[in-house]
Amino acid sequence: MLKKIEFDNFKSFEGKETINLEDLTTIIGLNSSGKTNILEGISILSNISSGVDITAYFNKYSKNSKESIRGGALGCCRARKKTFGLGCTIEKNNGHLLVYYLKIDASNEDRVYVDEENLYEFNKDGRRTTLFKTIKKEKLKGDIIVEYNNKKRGINPRIQCDRSYSILSQLKENTLRNYTLAEIQILLDNSTSDFKEITTLEELNTNENSILEDIKLVQKHIGNVRTVEPIPDKIREYVSRESTDLYSDASNLSAVLHTIIQRYQDDQKRLIRAQQHLDELGADSPKHIWKIRTERVNDLKIRYKISKEKYDSLLSIIQLLPEYQIEGLDTLVTPAPLRDVMFTCIEKGNDTNSNFKIPASLLSDGTLKTIAIATALVTYPEKSIILLDEFDSGTHHNKSVALLKELYRISKKRNIILVVTTHNTTLLNNYTNHFLQGTSVVYRDKKSYSSKIINFYNLYDVEKLLARGGLGDAARKDGLTKYLHPEPKKDISLPDWLLEGSKEHE
């Protein structure tokens, strides 16, 4: 499980700050407190660790860089600093922790590179084991020295890596070997007459280096971060139906929905036809033909169940919003040769024959945004981390409670972590203990003006806050100031008669 994200002199965060992640992580705070910086930091860590060209990523030279980094690489550094760091903590099945850290040097925006990178494992007793770490050398060189743990006695081997990319993305099976050249020579020198000829290094590398599994684990957890920031005006246009992976701005939402709807309808038709053919065969048909047709029906049932579940999950979220009833989804297709698509919501009329379609071009901003978020939730890979900045903007406060509960239900089913920001006090008032555990407050320190992160249950006098009402009411009154910066206790002056009585007692 991905447990924590660390920020080191990143944007408004001075020094090191950490946020804990739960299956639903809610970030609240006043405007400009640093909420969006947290989401952007998580996204940057995910992209860089995956192996993009770091300079191209920040300067938007790469096709993989679809999102804009506010202020570029230098804008990610706190105040006058030239470097910033990001990291994460992952808990393994055995209870050990993997702590990954990456520091980026942004002093020259034409050459942004890795300044420091490491991966450590901590056992349950807190003992640290180095899995890999960079060795400080001349910063002007294009290469960087990396020392890694080969799980053997003696000095750990070192290799050269390109500092234009994350080290995590470069440590693979062909770069990490269990056998050094010296060890190969020893094996050859000590071989007997029946020694089998070795043709490749892979034959000597029989025991897979165990740190590769830890590296893959980190890549798996931090690599599946997805940001969803729908732009309604882009969603209202016809789009090519070729793209099937939802963009962060949801501009291709109609194409993704077209694939989901078409697959659901096609699977349903195929299952009906296959079942009809099976029924027509009858019990007297040859056993081998009956078996083949039965297996075909069973396979189609599984496919239909999957596509129907995805379609129904979409509807369960969309139907929460409007006052009218949405019966289903469909798409409009332009004539050949383009055959571009736009999705529609099927609104229920007074009777079954009066249903009509509302195209995306006529839907409200809030509805489009919610449909985009719902689509991301059912199409992004399982165990993803989905970042939603002000997910409920454009949604009525009373509707947002039911919306979040449904989003959480589906994300829980698909093992997806939701990280959301909100200013909705009505929503926060409905937070139960489980949601409050994943709630963090971001605020500006009164002295340094840098951003700080504190978990809800670490607030001062949090018991009084809960006793007096919901979190939303407290946030609306003073932005939780009294629970972030408690006033010092005032000295209570005793009346004269009580002071005289105390002197007599002495």
Image (cartoon, helix red, strand yellow):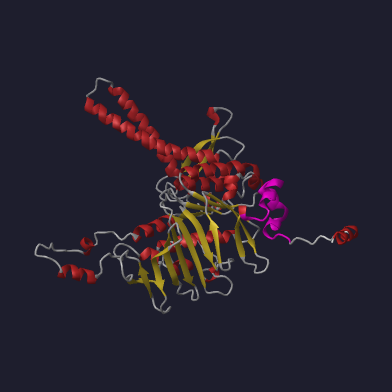
Location of residue 110 with respect to 179 vertically, above or below: below
Horizontal side of 216 relative to 247 (left or right) equals left
Residue in view at x 49 percent, y 55 percent: 3
Residue with the most extreme left position: 193
Does any portion of residue 243 appear in the rendered image? yes
Report x, y in % for residue 238: 49, 49
Does the magenta portion include 470?
Answer: yes
Residue in view at x 54 percent, y 70 percent: 77
Does the magenta portion include 193?
Answer: no
Location of residue 352 with respect to 346 vertically, above or below: above
Report x, y in % for residue 426: 66, 46
Residue in view at x 58 percent, y 68 percent: 14
Does any portion of residue 364 appear in the rendered image? no
Report x, y in % for residue 166: 41, 66
Location of residue 346 with respect to 467 vertically, above or below: above
Q: Nearer the viewer, residue 163 or 440?
A: 440
Q: How many marks?
A: 0
Report x, y in % for residue 454: 60, 58
Kindly indicate the quadrant of the structure image that contains residue 179.
bottom left
Residue with the most extreme top position: 284
Q: Quadrant of the C terminus?
A: bottom right
Q: Nearer the viewer, residue 101 or 149?
A: 149
| Prevailing secondary structure class for the magenta stretch in the rendered image | helix
Q: Which residues are magenta?
A: 458-487
Residue in view at x 54 percent, y 35 percent: 356
Kindly indicate the quadrant of the structure image that contains residue 348.
top right
Q: Nearer the viewer, residue 464 or 101?
A: 464
